[in-house]
Image: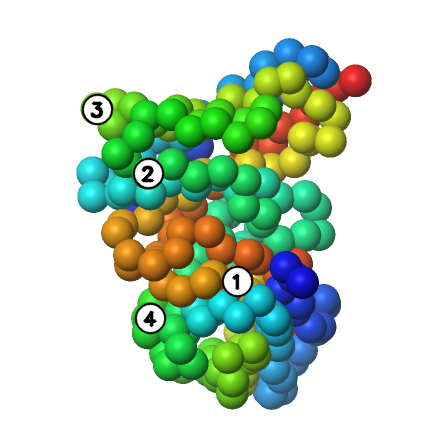
Amino acid sequence: DQQVKQNSPSLSVQEGRISILNCDYTNSMFDYFLWYKKYPAEGPTFLISISSIKDKNEDGRFTVFLNKSAKHLSLHIVPSQPGDSAVYFCAASVGNFNKFYFGSGTKLNVKP
Amino acid sequence: DTEVTQTPKHLVMGMTNKKSLKCEQHMGHRAMYWYKQKAKKPPELMFVYSYEKLSINESVPSRFSPECPNSSLLNLHLHALQPEDSALYLCASSQDMGDTEAFFGQGTRLTVV
């Protein structure tokens, strides 16, 4: 049973608009959440993280929102750029026990 | 240097072969990881090394044998694999096991024939 779920396998957005990628989780013990970006033939690259004590973390064009009551997090990219086209993985971990649970990924396509 | 380097990039092996995957990082990270990723699936954790000691084995079959000869190197020894073991094998490292930011290598695409 997958504890981290990304229900949208793909998303297509026009350049300059906002991309919103969603992630749901089932384990209430998760207290760190991460987003990774993966280009073809490359390993995942860490993008942004959020601790469960926060509900928002922002880094440049990337913002992650956490709704603990809904067990939902989202990644907002604004403005979206063609170079953002990649697969985005949501991941979660419990405390200092550094085991990441990954979602299945959402393939983002930003059209010029 | 913020890279995790994995070799080889591609590997084809028979079911009776013995081969090894290699992973190297020079960031001074003390935690290193092996993940397995099947097509269209998320990465699945296999092993975690912390300070060169095996900390986590996610019930991986013994035909996969990890080794951490020093703080910069992580090997995965393969023996008597099955075709269903064909996958992308990703290595990652982080400062320590309490660090939530991990750096991933590009992976080794393994095909077992």
Q: Amino acid at mark 2?
A: Ser
Chain at numbered mark 1: B
Name which residue type carries label 3.
Answer: Ser
For the residue pair A13 and B62, the one nearer the viewer reads as A13
The picture places residue B48, in percent across and down from the top left corner, at 40, 69
**Chain containing the residue with disc 3:** A
3D distance between C-alphas at marks 2 and 1: 21 Å
According to the image, label 2 marks what residue?
A: A51
| Amino acid type indicated by mark 4 | Ile
- Foreground of the two, A63 or A8: A63
Task: State the image coordinates of residue B13 (x, y, percent, origin top left).
Answer: 67, 78
Residue drawn at (60%, 32%), measured in percent from left and top?
Answer: A107
How far across and how far down the image is residue A63, in percent?
Answer: 49, 25
Q: Residue at x 60, y 18 (%)?
A: A78
Marks 1 and 4 share the same chain: yes
Mark 1 and mark 4: Cα distance apart in space: 14 Å
Q: Which residue is mark 3?
A: A69
> How far apart are labels 2 and 4 at the CA level?
23 Å
- Is residue A62 shown left or right of residue B96? right
Question: Mark 1: few, some, or many residues within 10 Å (few <14, many ≥20)?
Answer: many
**Badges 2 and 4, same chain:** no
Relative image position of residue A30 (x, y in whole percent): 26, 43
Q: Is residue B71 above or below residue A30?
A: below
Q: Dot 4 corresponds to which residue?
A: B56
Numbered badge on residue A104: none
Q: Between residues B62 and A108, which one lies in front from this camera angle?
A: A108
* Tag in front: 2 or 4: 2
Labels 3 and 1 in the same subunit: no
What residue sits right under mark 1 in the picture? B92
Q: Chain of mark 2?
A: A
Q: Chain of mark 4?
A: B
